Amino acid sequence: MKSSSGLPLHFPLNEVKATQVVARLITKSGEKLNYLLLMKILYTIDRVALVNWGLPVCGGSYCSLPKGPAISEVYDLVKSSKHLNRSGYWTTHLITKNFDLSVRKPPGVGELSPAEIELVDTVHVMLAHRDKWDVVQWTHDEFKEWEDPKGSSNPIPVEKILRVLGKSESEIRLLARETSYHAQVKISLGR
C-alpha cells in the first residue's frame, strides 16, 4: 500500500538488528524463548518504535497471521534457522529447536542504539513473563490493525499501523517522503 502522498512506506528488515534484538530477548529470558511469544514481542517493539520515532527497530513486512501480527521475514528466518546448513547472520547466531529459539553464538548489541536497547528491555519486561496464548489474545484485542486472516496471511501496511496509533495523514505523508529520500541517498551511496 502507498501512503496518501503516493510514496510507499516500507522499512526493509535489518537482519543484523533483528538478530541482536532476538538474542538479547532470549538471554534476558534464560536459555530459550518460544517463537510464538517472540513474534509478538518483536512486532510490539517495532510498533512502539514506529509511533515514537517514525522508524522501526527491526523493520520488515508486517502481516496478520491467525495467531496475531508478525514480521513476515522474521517468521521465515525462525523457520530457516532449524537448518544448520543455511548461512546468514541470523543462523550464525540463532537456532530454532522445536518451538523455541536459542542463542548459538552471541551477536552483541553493537547495531542497536541505547534507546532501542531500552525499548527492547521494556517490552521484554511487559510481555516475556506472560503466557504465549495470553499475549496472542492481547494482540488480537489491542492491535486494531490486526484482522483475522481466516487461516491465511494478510499484509499490514505501515500506514495502517500509524493511523491506528493516531498519526495524521500529514504526519504519514511526511514520514513517507523522508523515508523515500533516505532510501534514495543509500542507493546513490551504494549501500
Image (cartoon, rainbow, N blue to C red):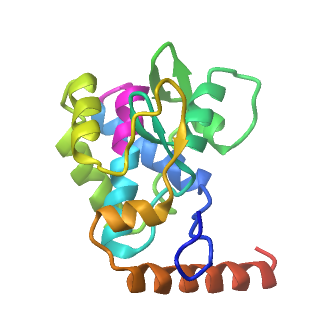
Name the residue: 43% across, 28% down.
66
Q: Quadrant of the C terminus?
A: bottom right
Tell me if residue 56 can be seen: no
Snapshot quadrant of residue 26: top left
- For the residue pair 184 and 100, the one nearer the viewer reads as 184
Q: Is residue 137 magenta?
A: no
Residue 74, placed above or below residue 174: above
Q: Measured from the top left, where is residue 119 in percent x and y? A: 29, 59
Name the residue: 26% across, 44% down.
124
- For the residue pair 15 and 74, the one nearer the viewer reads as 74
- For the residue pair 157 and 100, the one nearer the viewer reads as 157
Q: Is residue 164 left or right of residue 90?
A: left
Tell me if residue 1 can be seen: yes
Snapshot quadrant of residue 69: top left
Q: Measured from the top left, where is residue 64 in percent x and y? A: 46, 40
Q: Which residues are magenta?
A: 30-41
Q: Quadrant of the N terminus?
A: bottom right
Q: Measured from the top left, where is residue 50 in percent x and y? A: 38, 66
Q: Is residue 73 left or right of residue 118?
A: right
Name the residue: 51% across, 63% down.
111
Residue 67, placed above or below residue 159: above
- For the residue pair 190 and 10, the one nearer the viewer reads as 10
Q: Is residue 38 magenta?
A: yes
Number of numbered markers: 0
Q: Measured from the top left, where is residue 123 in percent x and y? A: 25, 49
Q: Is residue 169 left or right of residue 153?
A: left
Q: Residue furthest top?
A: 98
